[in-house]
Amino acid sequence: MGDTIWLPFPLLLLVALRLPGTAGFTPSLDSDFTFTLPAGQKECFYQPMPLKASLEIEYQVLDGAGLDIDFHLASPEGKTLVFEQRKSDGVHTVETEVGDYMFCFDNTFSTISEKVIFFELILDNMGEEAQEQEDWKKYITGTDVLEMKLEDILESINSIKSRVSKSGHIQTLLRAFEARDRNIQESNFDRVNFWSMVNLVVMVVVSAIQVYMLKSLFEDKRKSRT
């Protein structure tokens, strides 16, 4: 069995936005992780989730022979939600219950090749918006100079926050695609160099044999008699 890893809640906290004279916003719950899974091993992670939230898991195999892995996602009760075999990537979204969700990457089918795996967690509806509204209400008075409504401010902030989060998600995926493409290109480059050397050696050997055979055709093998 492989190692078991508990993910913090959230896994990685991004930098929280702060404005002068206002409450701090809740850090982004999106996170990503890249790790190396040795041949013949299995790695499991656990993510605690509240009720009626959204858990999205996206993974990619960045490097390793075949670029494939077995993936398993289970509910807090141990029920299998997703089971995939020999996949190079995948995206799965579930509406959660209270408890710890387990997802595993299995490389036990491989005997010699380790895999480099990237995965990203996107957690939505975690209850942070209600807390943000309560924090904002402490700083909004009825005699606001700009006469802006709390709803308008929250709508603008949530729109900006959503777009920034989406941009970060796209950039993370682009980096993952770039890493996988670079690994494929480097592997192809090594393969081309190897077979080029093999062809060069074969050509040299064939040329030497041809020269020897042509030379032997013109040699006078008759022995002179006295």
Image (spheres, rainbow, N blue to C red):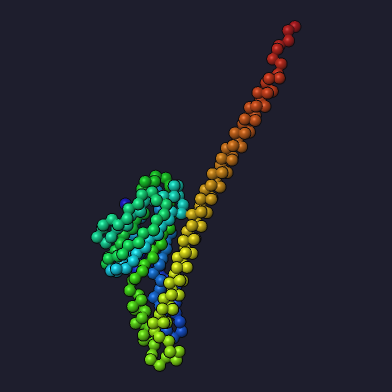
Q: Is residue 159 above or below residue 105?
A: below
Q: Is residue 149 left or right of residue 219?
A: left
Q: Position of residue 218 (x, y in %)?
A: 71, 19
Residue sitting nearer the eye, 101 or 140: 140
Q: Is residue 50 above or below residue 20?
A: above
Residue sitting nearer the eye, 222 or 116: 116
Residue drawn 67% across and 21% down?
216
Q: Position of residue 17 (x, y in %)?
A: 44, 77
Q: Is residue 12 above or below residue 215?
A: below
Q: Residue furthest bottom?
A: 143
Residue drawn 39% across and 56% down?
90
Residue drawn 39% across and 51% down?
87
Q: Is residue 77 left or right of residue 115?
A: left
| One can see residue 41 in this view | no
Residue sitting nearer the eye, 71 or 115: 71
Residue drawn 38% across and 48% down?
86
Which quadrant of the figure has residue 226? Answer: top right
Q: Residue furthest right?
A: 226
Residue sitting nearer the eye, 118 or 42: 118
Label tally: 0
Which quadrant of the figure has residue 18? Answer: bottom left
Q: Is residue 130 above or below residue 29?
A: below
